[in-house]
C-alpha cells in the first residue's frame, strides 16, 4: 500500500505534467507573436482574424497576437493555461490580409526555353 506522502507526490507530478501540456492546437488557436510589443501588434501584414490578448502573469502584463475561430476558444486556452485572473482583455488585431491568403507563397514559375 502507498503512503499518503507518495500519493501527494504523484498528484503533484501529474499536475505539473498536465500544466505544461496546453497546446493551442487543441483549442483551435495559433499563437502568431508571443510577448508582442505594440509596434509588432500593429503590423498590417497579419491576417484579419488575428486577436490581441492581454494577460497577467506574476503582476506583469503581457500581450500575444493569436488566431482563433472564436473568442471563447481563445479565452478557454488562456484561462486553462494561466488561471482564472490572468486574462485581462481580448481585442481585434490590426491585420489587413485575407486569412486564406496569409502565409501563401506563389509557386515558382518554370523557365521557358
Image (spheres, grey):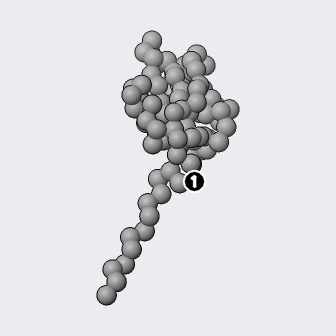
Q: Is residue 22 visible?
A: no
* Residue 66: x %, y % from top left: 52, 37
Q: Is residue 40 above or below residue 103?
A: above
Give the quarter of the image for residue 77.
top right
Front residue of this view, candidates 9 and 15: 15
Give the quarter of the image for residue 107.
bottom left
Q: Is residue 70 visible?
A: yes
Question: Residue reaching furthest top?
Answer: 59
Q: Secondary structure at mark 1?
A: loop
Residue shown at 39% from the left, 74% from the top: 109
Residue behind mark 1: 100
Q: Quadrant of the C terminus?
A: bottom left
Question: Residue reaching furthest bottom?
Answer: 113
Q: Quadrant of the N terminus?
A: top right
Q: Is residue 108 above or below residue 105?
A: below
Q: Is residue 109 above or below residue 72?
A: below
Give the quarter of the image for residue 15.
top right
Within-10-Å neighbours for mark 1: few <14, some 14–19, many 20+ = few
Residue shown at 43% from the left, 15% from the top: 60
Q: Is residue 51 above or below residue 98?
A: above
Residue shown at 45% from the left, 22% from the top: 62
Question: Residue reaching furthest front?
Answer: 113
* Residue 26: x %, y % from top left: 60, 44
Front residue of this view, candidates 12 and 28: 28
Residue shown at 59% from the left, 25% from the top: 90
Amino acid at each position: 500500500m502507498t503512503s499518503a506522502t507518495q500519493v501527494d507526490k504523484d498528484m503533484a507530478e501529474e499536475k505539473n505534467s498536465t500544466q505544461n501540456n496546453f497546446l493551442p492546437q487543441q483549442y483551435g488557436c495559433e499563437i502568431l507573436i508571443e510577448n508582442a510589443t505594440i509596434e509588432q501588434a500593429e503590423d498590417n501584414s497579419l491576417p484579419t482574424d488575428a486577436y490581441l490578448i492581454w494577460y497577467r502573469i506574476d503582476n506583469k502584463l503581457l500581450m500575444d497576437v493569436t488566431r482563433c475561430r472564436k473568442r471563447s476558444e481563445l479565452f478557454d486556452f488562456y484561462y486553462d493555461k494561466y488561471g482564472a485572473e490572468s486574462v485581462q482583455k481580448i481585442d481585434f488585431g490590426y491585420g489587413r490580409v485575407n486569412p486564406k491568403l496569409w502565409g501563401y507563397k506563389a509557386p515558382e514559375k518554370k523557365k521557358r526555353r
